[in-house]
Image (cartoon, helix red, strand yellow):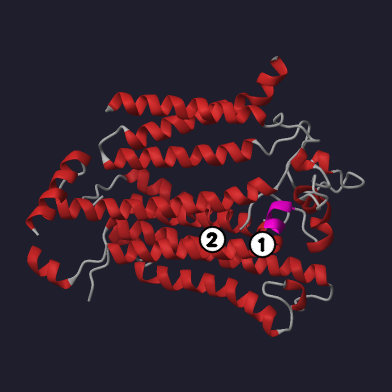
Amino acid sequence: MRTHRPNPIVSLVSRVVSPFIMMFALYVIFHGHYSPGGGFQGGTLIAAALILIRLAEGNETAQLQFPRAWATPLGSLGVLIYFGTGLAAVFMGGRFLDYSVLHLAHHATMSRSYGILLVEIGVGLAVTAILVSIFDNLLEGKPDA
Amino acid sequence: MLDFFIGHYAYWFVFILMAIGLYGMTVKCNLVKKLIGMTIFQVSIILFFVASANKWGATVPVLDHSAGSIDPTKYINPLPHTLMLTAIVVGVATLGVALALVITIYNRYQTLDETRLLEHMRKDDDSE
Amino acid sequence: MKTANYIVLLLFTGLMIYASLGLPQRGDPYATINLDESPVHSPGAAAYYIRNAHKDAHTDNMVTVILADYRGYDTLGEETVIMTAGLICFMLLRRRKEEKDENA
């Protein structure tokens, strides 16, 4: 992996295909309500699209798309979204992770539906960032300052 | 007798997979081959639970609005699928940490063979 | 040493096959786990989730409702596991300044 030999066919195909994989991954996350899918599956697909560019173009070029310094903060943001939704329910007077007291919609069941969507977005973000971070660290760890 | 075999053959194949994973973990000497055995063992457990959630003539656990009332014998059991989603992700996390440990061991001892590693560690213990 | 390994593996497989002889038929819609009421007269989990998922959360996919609503606490713990694994990999594989000076 450290001696990257550029290959025009692999480079062109991965550069064309990778945005479509990301689009399909967003579809899988947001349609977790109506078809098999959800947060974990979509998060893994986005991570696969980002790692494809790292494999095909070399590590230095791929850092321009998704720098390795973004990975841990985005992962923490994903966990914060999940935990924050649960704590917001406690502040509104309900139980922990009780989405019906959040009043995201008029009915209690629609509020639960939107609460599930919010939580799945947080999960997808965290899974993406951590998988890309594990790949980057296994490749070469960050030189400590 | 044939009914019994048809109702249970999937479990027996999963147990053969488990034995293959255990063979990789215990008999092989290279650390990376042990990790491959661990992954095969983990995947066999996931297959066991997902295969046990089946129902004859049932469909995926996504609600079908064209049917009238909800009949639980027409949808497969969704609970093992949910628990196995968690198990798959935990398996990926375990594999990532295990590979990081293998890289650290290689940087320290310059070998990945189990018997030579034990000799090195015993020498380090004796010299301290 | 290796033969002891193989014998233990064969015994393990035999023991698991013997233990699986008591399981119900794979796919029986009236097995004990798929009923509406368990033998101790508590509600059966799978049948409850299938019947009430759309009523409680206005969502078609029952697996997502179970994962994020009925059992959302387990999913929170699992996200913590992923985060911890990422942080462990980061901390194990940093390169410190003394090692870089030694290699240079």
Q: What label sits on residue C68 in the rendered view?
A: 1
Q: Relative to A13, does residue A59 appear above or below in the rendering?
A: below
Residue range of the region highlighted in magenta in the rendering: C61-66
Q: Which chain carries label 2?
A: C
- Residue A123 in the magenta stretch? The answer is no
Q: Position of residue B58 (x, y in %)?
A: 77, 36
Of B92 and A113, nearer the camera is B92
Q: Where is residue C55 in the image (x, y as percent from the top left)?
A: 84, 60
Q: Position of residue A92 (x, y in %)?
A: 72, 84
Of A131 and C73, nearer the camera is C73
**Please, what is the three-letter code of the amino acid marked with disc 2?**
Glu
Q: What label sits on residue A144 in the rendered view?
A: none
Position of A112 compared to C75: left or right? Answer: right
Q: For mark 2, give the secondary structure.
A: helix
Residue B116 appears in view = yes
Residue A52 appears in view = no
**Residue at 49%, 27% in the rendered image:** C13
**Residue at 31%, 38% in the rendered image:** B33
Q: In which quarter of the image is the C terminus of chain B?
A: bottom left
The residue that mark 2 highlights is: C78
**Please, what is the three-letter code of the amino acid marked with disc 1?**
Ala
C-alpha span from label 1 to label 2? 12 Å
Position of A82 compared to C24: left or right? Answer: left
